[in-house]
Image (cartoon, helix red, strand yellow):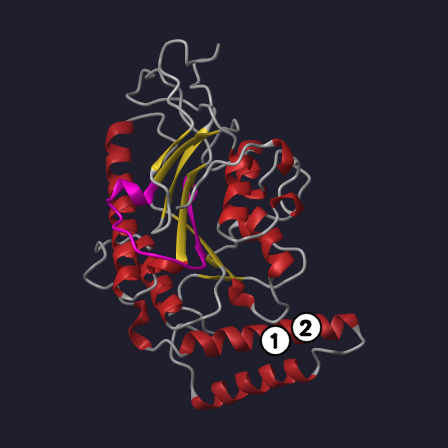
Amino acid sequence: MRSRRSANCSRSRPRCRPRDASGLCLRRLRPRARRRRKRSAGDRAWEVGATDAGLATGWLGRYLDRVGSADNPLQGLSLDNRLQPALATGKVPVASIDGPDRYTFAARRAESELEIRILDAVGELGLAHAASRDRAIRDVASAAAQSHRLRRELQGLGAGVGQVPPLYPQSTDEFPRRLAGLAAMLSAGLPIRCAALKAPGMYDTHADQADELNTALKLTADSLVAFQRDLEARGLADRVLVHVWSEFGRRARENGSDGTDHGAGGLGLLIGSRVHGRMIGEFPGLGSGLDEQGNLRATADFRGFYSAILEQWFDTDAAAIIPGAASFARPALLR
């Protein structure tokens, strides 16, 4: 999320209660980063799953390139007004939508019967030319066909999918609504493998940190608890693993504005019914655990954590996705 993000990865197994420590895993990881609005090298590293700034695809995008299909844009879903970089692929299609109820080609109104017929015809035209020998025609046809499929699948969810159920926090922020929409999409059987979305709040807390964090973290936590309970009520909790991550940390010492300045490292949570509840890495302490610049020392590597998710949840060889994966220790994440 910018500043905190979550990736919801569909697959399978048992139940958990979201406030039960047995279903929650905390980690403290590196690398170093700075920022909020400017993109940093550390931010990029979390997204691509490597410290190589030249990588053009995200770590989940490379997973989808390996196991995904050429005709399923929902396999990687960014619930945002832009594609989350972790989902960037090189071979297969992925989708970025503001919400399952907001994907339309009409100008903020219901589609007319004529518009529906035109859009259907464009989709059929795309399907008819998807195998064209002309690459330009093939690319345009593929985009038309995939947009048509995405529109039809989302329309099948019904008009109420954009409403926030009472189970979720009622907020002007989009986060609870998008999580509720994601739960509805999974319940409808849409072919989603990975989803990413941005959590509420501004975490670059140079000033008034306590108030900012209290508000943002409460809405984030309450929304995630509601999402987990929603999945349980729908019988889907065994299919979803939630990874919440923060791309950079803060200095340990308070500055002169009731805040803290940019730090190194980062942290995250792994939530799900199969998660082995524990802490990965160690809290280094505020004495000898600080480096010469006043940063908390990282005690685990995010690349080993990603490798463990790929191998233990997705049953996929991490070496094909995370550069240098063999050199990173894999924590045991799942029961």
For the residues labelled 2 and 1, the Cα–Cα distance comes to 6 Å
Please determine whether, in this image, residue 252 is positioned above or below residue 166.
Answer: above
Image spot of residue 144 (x, y percent): 61, 75
Looking at the image, which is closer to me, 228 or 223?
228
Residue 111 occupies which quadrant of the picture?
bottom left
Q: Where is residue 197 in the image (x, y as percent from the top left)?
A: 42, 52
- Magenta segment: does it hold 18? yes
65 or 116: nearer the viewer: 65
The answer to whether 66 appears left or right of 13 in the picture is right
Up-down: is 86 above or below 155? above
Q: Which amino acid does label 1 sit on?
A: Ala
Q: Residue at x 61, y 60 (%)?
A: 67
Viewer can see residue 201? no
Location of residue 133 by image quarter? bottom right
Q: Give the range drawn in magenta.
A: 1-24
Q: Which residue is drawn at 39% across and 68% down?
A: 185
Percent position of residue 182, x then y: 37, 62
User: Counting other residues with Cα less than 10 Å from the Cα at mark 2, is it few (<14), some (14-19), or many (20 or more)?
Assistant: some
Q: Mark 2 sits on what residue? A: 140
Q: Residue at x 23, y 64 (%)?
A: 165
Mark 1 and mark 2 in contact (Cβ < 8 Å)? yes
Q: Mark 1 points at which residue?
A: 144
